[in-house]
Amino acid sequence: MGEETGGIAARKGDHLDIVLSPRLKGRQAETGFDAVRFEHVALPEVDLDAIDLGTRFLGRTLRAPILISSMTGGPERAGAINARLAEAADHLGLALAVGSQRIALEGRGAGGLDAGLRRRAPNAPILANIGAAQLVAGWGPDEARRAVAMIEADALIVHLNPLQEALQPGGDRRWSGILAAIEALVEAVEFPVVVKEVGAGISGRLARQLVDAGVAAIDVAGAGGTSWAAIEAERTSDPRARAAALLFSDWGIPTARAIRDVRVACPEAVVIGSGGVRNGLDAARAIRLGADLVGQAAAGLPAADRSSEAVVDHFTQVIEELRIACFCTGSADLAALRRAPLLPSGG
């Protein structure tokens, strides 16, 4: 299955350092969010503090429609980050998705991915995480159950990262049969399965296939956020590999387009809008385009690398910005925000 686990841990530590550095600036696609402009409501007829941002997800109540998306790294560093994210998610009433549990499942370091995570976030919906490529490399329901049980999760994410695997040394190159493997996994396990990309987006066409296969939710993770191609370009010393990675650094379906297309193709599905969500206004845009929840990872990573208090401060700001967007569109709740008028394109 590609690299040895020690190499995977080092690679994930590299990923954190690169995302936290300024080196990726300008090396990603546009999300499409800036083209989405709300019609301002000068007379909102709603009290700002009375706006209800609450929603339900995986049988639990959220105080705001935000998923703290998958962040990872080498086991020791990831342990501190996961603890901080869990504490913040529980404090603010948000959902939490962990990064890949491959290292932990292989017994080479938990990275905070154990029962302690649930103790830090007893009330938060928690999502476990494995890679889709592992489903055709020997993994199946047993590993999925272990991933969920390890952190007492409410659901399992299966992440899709074909571009990243194609570009990184030792990446998983066998992807034939994964849709059938996902369908078989969904049928075998007792918990919801969520499928997400890692930054290149999911099309409406694929989302329809996944929902028909029984997947409980789609996280579009569109282009415009962290570019894993650009990250791999930073990691390699091979000029040819770097050139190939840079060529694909803006590859993918822009997040705004992915959300809209998935919602149209799957009107009944739970849709998570992630990929370059910078702030609460982007979160409002994602919800207006059709997302039920909004995921954010990279924008919150600097805070997660510092302290739980910094994570709480960061997401408190995002929630307040989302509330202001609701207020200035006259939206008393998320259902109203989904109907808020938009200015014509170019308006």
Image (cartoon, rainbow, N blue to C red):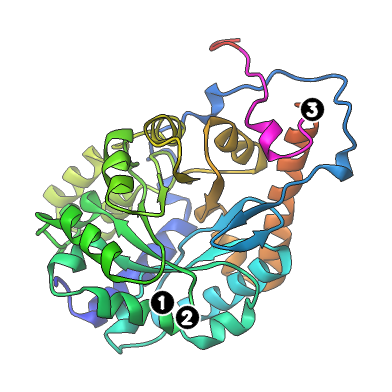
Dot 1: few (<14), some (14–19), or many (≥20) neighbours within 10 Å? many
Q: Where 344 falls versus 62 (above or below)?
A: above
Q: Secondary structure at mark 3?
A: loop
Horizontal relation, residue 329 to residue 159: left or right: right
Residue range of the region highlighted in magenta in the rendering: 330-343
The image shows residue 319 at horizontal and vertical percentages of: 72, 49
The image shows residue 273 at horizontal and vertical percentages of: 49, 43
Q: Are marks 2 and 1 in contact (CB under 8 Å)?
A: yes
Residue pictured at 44% horizontal, 57% vertical: 19
Q: Amino acid at mark 3?
A: Gly
Give the labeled residue for mark 1.
148
Work out how far the residue at label 3 is from the one at label 2, CA to CA, in angstroms: 40 Å
Horizontal relation, residue 43 to residue 114: left or right: right
Depth check, front residue: 115 or 269: 269
Mark found first going from the N terminus, 1 or 3:
1
Q: Amino acid at mark 2?
A: Ile
Q: Is residue 70 magenta?
A: no
Q: Secondary structure at mark 2?
A: helix
The image shows residue 245 at horizontal and vertical percentages of: 22, 46
Give the labeled residue for mark 3.
330
Horizontal relation, residue 99 to residue 125: left or right: left
Give the labeled residue for mark 2.
151
Residue 332 lies in quadrant: top right
* The N terminus: image quadrant: bottom left
Q: Is residue 339 magenta?
A: yes
Depth check, front residue: 120 or 243: 120
Residue 243 lies in quadrant: top left
The image shows residue 18 at horizontal and vertical percentages of: 40, 59
Residue pictured at 12% horizontal, 48% vertical: 240
Q: Main secondary structure of the magenta part?
A: loop
Q: Amino acid at mark 1?
A: Val
